[in-house]
Image (cartoon, helix red, strand yellow):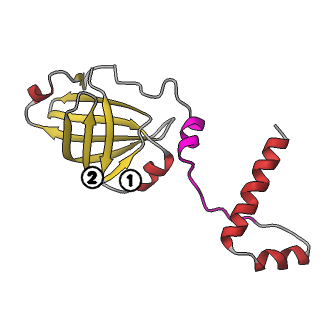
Amino acid sequence: MVVVKSVTIDGESIHVFRNAVYIFESSSGFTLEVDLIVSEVVVKKYKNVDNLIVEIELEDGRIINSIMHVKILSGGLPQLNLFCEIDDPQEYEDFNRVNENDSWFPNIEDGITIEEIRKVEMPNEDVSIKLNLPIDQVEWLKKQKKKTLNEIFQEMIYEYLEKHK
C-alpha cells in the first residue's frame, strides 16, 4: 500500500492528518487522486483555487510533482481532493485502484476528530457582537486595540467554558 509522507502545495508544506492515494479508473481515463484530511485553515486557503503545484513525498521515497486540480470534499472533516490525469497507469502499479462503478472508496475519516485537528491548527473567524453595556464599559472598549480585545474575549470565553463544563 502506498502512503503519503508529506505534501507541499505551491511551495508550502501543509499538515496532513490522514490521507489516501489511489488511481481512479473511469470511462474517460485514469486519474491520480489524493484525498487529504487537513485543517479548516488549509481548506479555507485553497477553496477558491482550481489548480495547484503539488509535491507529494511517499513513504518509500518516491516524489510526485504535478499540477493538480483541487476539490473541497464536503461532509464531516475538512478534506481536499487533489487529482490529475495520468497517461500510463502502469507507472502506478502498486497504488490502490478505484473504479467509477465500485462502491468502495477510501475512508480516511475513521479515528480522527475535528477537536484533534483544531489542537494542531485552530481557525479564527471574524465575529460581530451587539451588546447593551453601561456607557463606562463602552468607552473603555472603544479605547482598546483590536488585538487586545481579541485576547480579552478569548481568555474570558475559555475561562467561562471551563467553569461551566
Which sits in the foreground, 17 or 33?
A: 17
Q: Is residue 10 left or right of residue 123?
A: left
Cα separation, mark 1 vs mark 2, equals 9 Å
- Under circle 1, the secondary element is helix
- Residue 135 highlighted magenta (yes or no): no
Sequence-wise, the earlier of marks 1 and 2 is 1
> Pointer 1: what residue?
46
Q: Residue at x 47, y 28 (%)?
A: 109
Please state which amino acid type lies under the numbered disc 1.
Answer: Tyr
Give the number of marks: 2
Please state which amino acid type lies under the numbered disc 2.
Answer: Leu
The percent position of residue 110, horizontal first and vertical second, equals 49, 24
Q: Disc 1 vs disc 2: Cβ atoms closer than 8 Å?
A: yes
Q: Residue furthest front?
A: 61
Q: Residue at x 26, y 40 (%)?
A: 56
The percent position of residue 158, horizontal first and vertical second, equals 75, 49
> Pointer 2: what residue?
52
Q: Residue at x 23, y 46 (%)?
A: 68
Quarter of the picture holding the N terminus: top left
Quarter of the picture holding the C terminus: top right
The residue carrying pointer 1 sits among few (fewer than 14), some (14 to 19) or many (20 or more) residues within 10 Å by Cα, namely some
The percent position of residue 156, horizontal first and vertical second, equals 79, 55
- Magenta span covers which residues? 114-129
- Residue 118 highlighted magenta (yes or no): yes
